[in-house]
Structures are given as C-alpha cells and as structure tokens.
C-alpha cells in the first residue's frame, strides 16, 4: 500500500506550485456518466499520459482506479494537453482524485481532487508505517537463471538493499513498490510489504523478490520506491531463452520426418503385392531359370514364335557293299 499521498488539487485547481507539471479540472464534481475536461501544463513535450479517476486518493496504486474508463493523451510541443474524461465510479470509495501520469520515460504523476457524485465516501486508511527510509549501501540482485528460464520460464531475482530509518518514528512493516522497465517504457510497479521493523536511527537489510514476464529478455531496470521517492535503480541484463528457439528448430525437423515415415508405412501397407507364379523347390528354381523340371526349355510367357518349327533332316549313312 502506498504510504505517502500524492499532491492533491483543491477544487479542481492546479496541483503543483513549484514550476513542475500542473493539472486543472473543468468541474470539481460530477456524477457517473458525465464528463469533465482535464488540462495540463509543464509536462514533457510529446509525452504520453494516462488519465484515471481513482478512489481513496489513490492509496494502493492503480488498484483504486477505474482503469477500464481511463483515457490517454499526448502533450504538444510545449508540454500542454487538453482531454475530456468520462466520469466513472472507481472500485474504492472517495475521497477521489483524477490521476495523471506518464507512460514512457521518467515517471511523473500529479493528482487533482475530484468528487464523484453519488459515490460512497469513507475515511482514508491509516498509515501502517512511519519513519523516513533511505538506502545506505549499493543494492544487488541475487540469484541465477535455471534450466526452466532457458526454456522461457519467468526470470526471477531477489533485490537486496540496506535501508536506514532517518525519521524519529520506527518503520513497521514498510510497504515498498518494486518496478521493472524495459527500454524507454515507464516502470510497472508492484507493491510488496516487508515484514519487520526498522527502528529510528537504525538500519536493516530488506530482501524483495523480482519477477519478469515469461520469455522476457534484454536490458531491464529494477526500481524500488518507498512512498513517492525512488530509492534504487538497478540494471538487470536478461539472456535470451535459447531453449525455446532450439525447441522450435527441432520441432520443424522432427515433425516433417515423422509424418513422412508414417505416410510411407501407410503406403507400404495399402499398395497390393505382386504374386510369383512359381513357388519353391525345383519347380520354382526351374521357372526362374526358364527351364522345365525335366531339363527342357520352358517357353517364356511373352514370347510367341512367328513361324512353325522346322523339321529335322535325317542324313543316311552310306552302307558298305558287303552288307545285306
């Protein structure tokens, strides 16, 4: 749960007076189904922003906002914008705010107070922690990628930081926000509560798990935020899951081969087999040699003589004169 409340506007007026980004609302109250106009100045030029209506002054992050009814807008060359926003009831009771934040680049957010007519109102939850925490030592990401990560499982690490309490009150069970960003995109924050107490003037080692999406690879930035202050930014280089590539390569090789072998087996079973006229023994051997079992020649089935066989001429031997 977010501990420090973001600056809030009064009656829809500008919410920052330090020369930073400002937000102004056309009306300070409207019911569900109505619309209001949100204008802003002092933002980064050509920056992409999101506009949300949130309950409980956005304590608890975007879980308190009507995310499905949010709108996006891009600032002009001078860092100004103007956008209409439909009024929707947030999942948490009021007091409510219109939350404007950057999507890409450095994280910047401004809230303007707004009342959703007819929406329940409840007291804000009490702060569960106190003190002012700061980082005293260089953070580190512990852990390594296993075999499952090589095949596309979500990469996991443990962020370890040493924090000190500079305040006068102890920080009991502090709630941090761990964010991961890739490239130029803004961090995606996730709230994590650390179980323990950091006494005033003391320090403690905090360990928080960090997990990316399945198949994530490339250069990431892990951020740690306490309240509205970013305490840590730690780079994290994630290797490519080559096991997934290897799997698809093998799949492209094995599947066609298996299909081909199965097809050939089916063809071999379906096609008719040729039968041999002669079978086994002397008769079969004689047939293969083209002779009859008695030693005579067997006529080939495809050969038909064109003429009748010639007669054999008998030559008489001369007899001797003395013979009868």
Image (cartoon, rainbow, N blue to C red):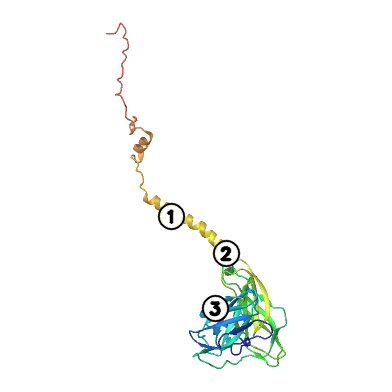
Judging depth in this view, the residue of 302 and 156 nearest the camera is 156
Examine the image and state in which quarter residue 53 appears.
Answer: bottom right
Q: How many numbered marks, from 0 up?
A: 3
Query: At 59% across and 64% down in the image, what residue appears?
Result: 242
Quadrant where the C terminus sits is top left
- In the displayed structure image, the side of residue 31 where residue 181 appears, left or right: right
Q: Counting other residues with Cα less than 10 Å from the Cα at mark 3, is it few (<14), some (14-19), or many (20 or more)? A: some
**Residue behind mark 3:** 71
In the image, residue 69 above or below residue 315: below
Regarding residue 1, the answer to whether it shows in the image is no
Q: Give the mark toward the camera: 3 or 1.
A: 3
Query: At 45% across and 56% down in the image, what residue appears?
Result: 259
Examine the image and state in which quarter residue 161 appears.
Answer: bottom right
- Marks 3 and 1, how far apart at CA: 56 Å
Q: Which mark is residue 262?
A: 1
Regarding residue 245, the answer to whether it shows in the image is yes
Judging depth in this view, the residue of 118 and 180 nearest the camera is 118
Q: Earlier in the sequence, mark 2 or mark 3?
A: 3
């Amino acid at each position: 749960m977010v501990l420090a409340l973001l600056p809030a506007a009064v009656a829809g007026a500008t919410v920052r007076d330090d020369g930073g980004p400002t937000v102004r609302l056309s009306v300070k109250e409207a019911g569900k189904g109505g619309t209001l106009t949100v204008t802003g100045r002092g933002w980064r030029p050509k920056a992409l922003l999101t506009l949300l209506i949130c309950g409980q002054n956005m304590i608890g992050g975007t879980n308190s906002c009507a995310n499905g009814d949010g709108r996006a807008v891009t600032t002009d060359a001078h860092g100004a914008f103007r956008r209409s926003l439909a009024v929707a009831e947030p999942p948490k009771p009021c007091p409510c705010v219109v939350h404007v934040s950057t999507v890409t680049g450095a994280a910047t957010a401004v809230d303007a107070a707004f009342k959703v007519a007819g929406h329940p109102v409840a007291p804000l939850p009490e702060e569960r922690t106190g003190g002012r925490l700061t980082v005293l030592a260089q953070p580190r990401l512990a852990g390594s990628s296993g075999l499952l990560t090589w095949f596309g499982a979500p990469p996991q690490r443990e962020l370890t930081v040493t924090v000190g309490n500079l305040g006068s009150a102890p920080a009991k069970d502090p709630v941090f926000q761990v964010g991961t960003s890739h490239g130029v995109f803004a961090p995606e924050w996730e709230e994590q509560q650390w179980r323990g107490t950091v006494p005033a003037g003391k320090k403690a080692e905090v360990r928080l798990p960090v997990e990316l999406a399945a198949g994530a690879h490339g250069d990431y930035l892990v951020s740690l935020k306490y309240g509205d202050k970013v305490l840590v930014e730690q780079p994290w280089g994630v290797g490519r899951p080559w096991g997934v590539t290897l799997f698809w390569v093998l799949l492209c090789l094995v599947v066609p081969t298996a299909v081909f072998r199965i097809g050939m087996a089916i063809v071999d079973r379906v096609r008719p087999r040729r039968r041999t006229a002669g079978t086994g023994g002397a008769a079969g051997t004689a047939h293969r040699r083209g002779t009859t079992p008695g030693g005579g020649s067997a006529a080939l089935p495809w050969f038909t003589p064109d003429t009748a066989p010639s007669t054999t001429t008998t030559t008489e031997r001369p007899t001797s004169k003395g013979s009868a």
